[in-house]
């Protein structure tokens, strides 16, 4: 039994949203993901999917994409990305599939780890961070604490966090997210959102103050799920 992650699947089986407009590496990207997934992941494994799952606008359209994920091996834990407009109530989504779970203000488990998280938001920076951004940023910090505290209340002390947005700005300055990760002694943080070579370079990767940061945008991973544990 292993833990994998891959984010930013950007599926569009119910709509016409070809991803190859973002580069040749995106040509047939769903087939690349599927082939690598089936080759490496078994039914007893767990896969973290940190957002930007489907281009659909409503759940009834996203079902086509969610069914595609559901039919792949393993148990899946999903979190919302900035493009997941179809995302609706947790009770509704978590009633749809036996092996797919949706994370928001709650947590799930992998062995003795609590899988916690929130969508996240852009961190304070010099380019764009207005009052609207501040409001969402602070809300996401609160949601992250809700998720972690729910696990702590149930006796967990080993944490892996999944977010969609990176944990810091392009200067790698300390953010409220990083402060929370260090406070709770989170072991690993899985995130996505970043695309293209310049953005990849701006993503925090590796170990910082005891926390390992792992970028899992599918194009960064060459459309191959990465093993986390």
Image (cartoon, rainbow, N blue to C red):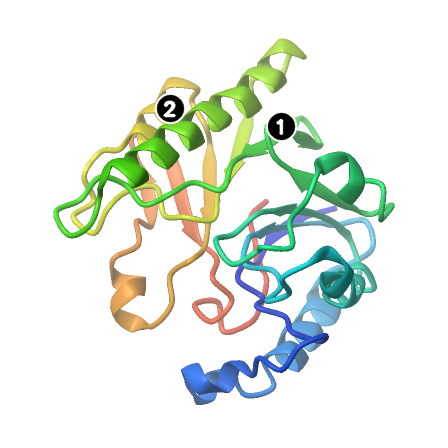
Taking 100 as reference, is 213 left or right? Answer: left
Q: Residue at x 38, y 61 (%)?
A: 194
Q: In this view, does 142 lie to the left or right of 8?
A: left
Q: In this view, does 116 lie above or below 218?
A: above
Which disc number belongs to residue 114? 1
In percent of the image, x 72 and y 66: which residue is there?
65
Label 1 CA crowd tier, 10 Å (few <14, some 14–19, many 20+):
many
Residue 175: assigned label: none
- When asked about the image quadrant of residue 86, the answer is bottom right
| Image position of 113 (left or right of 138) | right
> Which residue occupies 69% across, 65% down?
40
Is label 2 in a helix, a strand or a loop? helix
Q: Mark 2 points at which residue?
A: 180
Q: Nearer the viewer's eye, disc 1 or disc 2?
A: 2
Q: Which sits earlier in the primary sequence, circle 1 or circle 2?
A: 1
Q: Tell me where residue 58 appears, x and y as whole percent.
A: 68, 58
Which residue is at 48% across, 43% downward? Answer: 163
Q: In this view, does 220 lie above or below 7?
A: below
């Amino acid at each position: 039994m292993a833990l994998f992650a891959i984010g930013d699947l950007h599926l569009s089986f119910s709509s016409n949203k070809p991803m190859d407009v973002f580069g040749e590496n995106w040509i047939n990207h769903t087939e690349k993901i599927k082939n690598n997934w089936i080759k490496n992941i078994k039914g007893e494994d767990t896969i973290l999917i940190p957002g930007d799952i489907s281009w659909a606008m409503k759940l009834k359209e996203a079902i086509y994409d969610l069914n595609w994920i559901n039919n792949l091996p393993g148990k899946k834990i999903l979190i919302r990305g900035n493009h997941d407009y179809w995302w609706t109530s947790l009770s509704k989504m978590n009633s749809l599939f036996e092996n797919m779970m949706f994370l928001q203000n709650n947590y799930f488990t992998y062995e003795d780890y609590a899988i916690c998280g929130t969508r996240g938001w852009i961190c304070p920076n010099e380019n764009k961070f207005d009052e609207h951004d501040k409001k969402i940023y602070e809300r996401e910090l609160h949601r992250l604490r809700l998720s972690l505290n729910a696990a702590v209340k149930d006796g967990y002390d080993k944490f892996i966090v999944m977010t969609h947005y990176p944990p810091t700005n392009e200067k790698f300055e300390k953010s409220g997210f990083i402060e929370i990760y260090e406070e709770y002694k989170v072991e690993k943080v899985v995130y996505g959102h970043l695309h293209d070579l310049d953005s990849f370079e701006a993503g925090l990767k590796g170990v910082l103050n005891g926390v390992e940061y792992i970028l899992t945008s599918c194009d960064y991973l060459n459309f191959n799920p990465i093993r986390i544990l």
